Image (spheres, grey):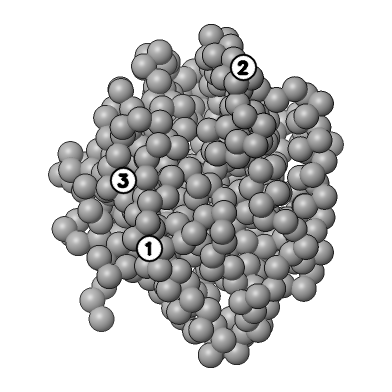
Amino acid sequence: MAQTALHFRTATSLAAALRARRVSSVELLELFLARVKAHNPRINAVIELAAARARRRAREADKALARGARGRPLLGVPMTIKDSFDVAGMRTSWGDPALKDNVARQDALAVQRLEAAGAIVFGKTNVPLMLADWQSFNAIHGTTNNPWDLARGPGGSSGGSAAALAAGLTGLEAGSDIGASIRNPAHYCGVYGHKPTWGIASPRGHALPGNVALSDISAIGPMARGAGDLAVALDAMVGPDAVDGRGWRLVLPREQRRALRDFRVAVILDDRNAEVDASVRDEIAALAAFLRRRGAKVSMTARPEIDFDALMRVYIALLRAATSARLTDEALARMVAEAGRLAPGDESYRARMLRGNTLFHRDWLRANEQRHRMRLAWEAFLGDWDVILCPTATTAAFPHDQKGERWERMLDVNGGRQPGTEQMFWAGLGGAFYLPATVAPAGQTRQGLPVGVQIMSAQYRDHTTIRFAQLLEREWRGFVPPPGFD
């Protein structure tokens, strides 16, 4: 079997090669910089470089490695990071032309922690405007293409992150996720992504200028070409900031199971809130059949005692309430007027979005109460089932479509037309309820596009979903490089 090319290896494999002195950090960095120069023009994933900063840190890493330094699991590994994370001396734009010259003065806490673990940030990757799309395009940096098919998007909002990983332009990535913004690009690009349990990784330095409050639902987490990388990077990223750390510390349970047969697996293939295309559904069904053959306890019918229609309504209300802080006063005023003209029975995405963006606090409290009742129902269900497998989205990566509003853009699902926003159901299934979720490669469509599987578990069982992804990587399927990026 041919050896994996250096640029397509996992971050942990690269770190091992560095420790063994088979390659230097400077050499790795120059390799990735050369690949960005050669391949990035086709996909437009990397939007800014900090080569001088990275070269200095790579030289320091090589000196430390030469001294036999240990204890920093990512020492010398070059990485890029989503544009929305602050990196001192680099721009943080969120895809907004008003922020195109916003240069960060200090590193985000996640950047500090990843670099404390030895990683070297050398560039930033593209996002949609205000991180608010399942495509990655904006007026500053343009459109990011999917390495598997340049006519298709890589997902959003961490689309540049996933595309850079898939194309072998970087060793590791980190993204953020409030509506599948880590999970969706991982699925579309055939890489790994982990949305952590809400609140376990401080987002300090991942915010619009001047903002410091923790947002509801949103989480930051790692993206990679290997499941093991997720575990290492997650351990580096999690924990409270300095203020909260004065009073509490995080201890995530470690997963002890070593074989797929030891897991109890509930599988959700479809739902009327977001019909799943057969090209995606069939790959996850094939995985479920494989797990049953491996000896795992698998159920295709087990469900929590939750009304999924109500779950979708609650998620969209809380999601849009959380993101309403990004609206200008003028935009909010327009939405208040539009919401007032809605018919009482209008349950379209647009109607739910307008109501969520303009919720009275009393109504938010009611939705939050519903959320926490559902959260406890998930907890009861996940006492009987170790992991849940489900789709990440209703289709594989779709062709670029930047016209109109998001709810007006249609997807081809089983020969029918589906509003792209409908698939938010699969983002919110566990997202609003604090559940950790890992996306891992599960297969490919007949068109050769990647299909990922979303693996969810109980709150704080992050290492359970990652361990399950590791076992799938070993026994079912792992990262496959897209053609044309050798």
Q: How far across and down, in percent of the image, does residue 63 sit?
A: 39, 45
Q: Is residue 431 above or below residue 331?
A: below
Q: How far across and down, in percent of the image, does residue 218 sit?
A: 61, 38
| Lower sequence index among marks 3 and 2 | 3
Residue 336, numbered circle: 2
Mark 2: amino acid: Val
Judging from the image, what secondary structure is the residue with disc 3 in? loop
Classify 10 Å Cα crowding around label 3: few (below 14), some (14-19), many (20 and above).
many
Q: Is residue 366 above or below residue 68?
A: above
According to the picture, the residue beneath numbered tag 3 turns out to be: 153
- CA gap between label 1 and label 2 equals 36 Å
- CB contact under 8 Å: marks 1 and 3: no
Mark 1: amino acid: Asn
Q: Residue at x 62, y 61 (%)?
A: 456
Residue toward you, 418 or 262: 418
| Lower sequence index among marks 1 and 3 | 3
Q: Residue at x 79, y 44 (%)?
A: 370
Q: Residue at x 65, y 69 (%)?
A: 387
Q: Is residue 8 above or below residue 132?
A: below
